[in-house]
Image (spheres, rainbow, N blue to C red):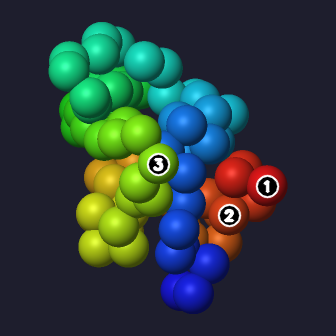
Amino acid sequence: MSGLHSLKPERVIKALERAGWVVARKSGSHVHMKKEGNPCILSIPVHKGKPMKKGLMLSQLSKAGLTIEDFLKLYT
């Protein structure tokens, strides 16, 4: 799980797009993503210069149905 530290939100969004998620809307400093066939909405905070926190990342991956290993392959 150490691979989930200091992930850049912009790169997280790109990785999720590779997994089939699309940006549904942007609201303030958050990007909301959806995927056909998945009822969940992912909310990715995009705060300048701040990485995503590990707990939030684990929650979003669970909603997305991705394992940590699968996500890290998409992230690189």
Mark 1–mark 3 distance (CA, rounded to whole Å): 19 Å
Q: Could you tell me the amino acid type at mark 1?
A: Thr
Reply above or below: 9 against 20: below
Q: How many marks?
A: 3
In the rendered image, residue 34, in percent from the top left (x then y), is placed at 35, 25
Picture layout, residue 58 above or below residue 14: below
Secondary structure category for the residue under label 2 = helix
State the separation of the CA atoms marked 2 and 1: 6 Å
Residue 13 left/right relative to 50: right
Residue marked by disc 2? 72
Label disc, if present, on residue 49 of the rendered structure: 3
Give the mark nearest the N terminus, 3 or 2: 3
Q: Tag 3: residue type?
A: Gly
Q: Residue furthest front?
A: 49
The residue lying toward the viewer, choosing from 27 and 38, is: 27
The circle drawn on residue 76 is 1
Secondary element at tag 3: loop
Task: Name the one closer to the observer, 7 or 62.
Answer: 7
Tell me residue 51's x, y (percent).
45, 58
Say if residue 16 shows up in the picture.
Answer: no
Residue nearest the viewer, comparing 47 with 23 = 47
Ranked by sequence position, the earlier of labels 1 and 3 is: 3
Q: Residue at x 29, y 16 (%)?
A: 26
**Residue 7 in view in this figure:** yes
Which of the 4 image quadrants contains residue 19?
Answer: top right
Asked whether the residues under the numbered discs 2 and 1 touch, taking CB atoms below 8 Å apart as contact, a structural biologist would say yes
Callout 2: few (<14), some (14-19), or many (20+) C-alpha neighbours within 10 Å?
A: some
The residue shown at (42%, 18%) is 23
- Circle 1: element type: loop
Asked which quadrant contains residue 42, the reply is top left
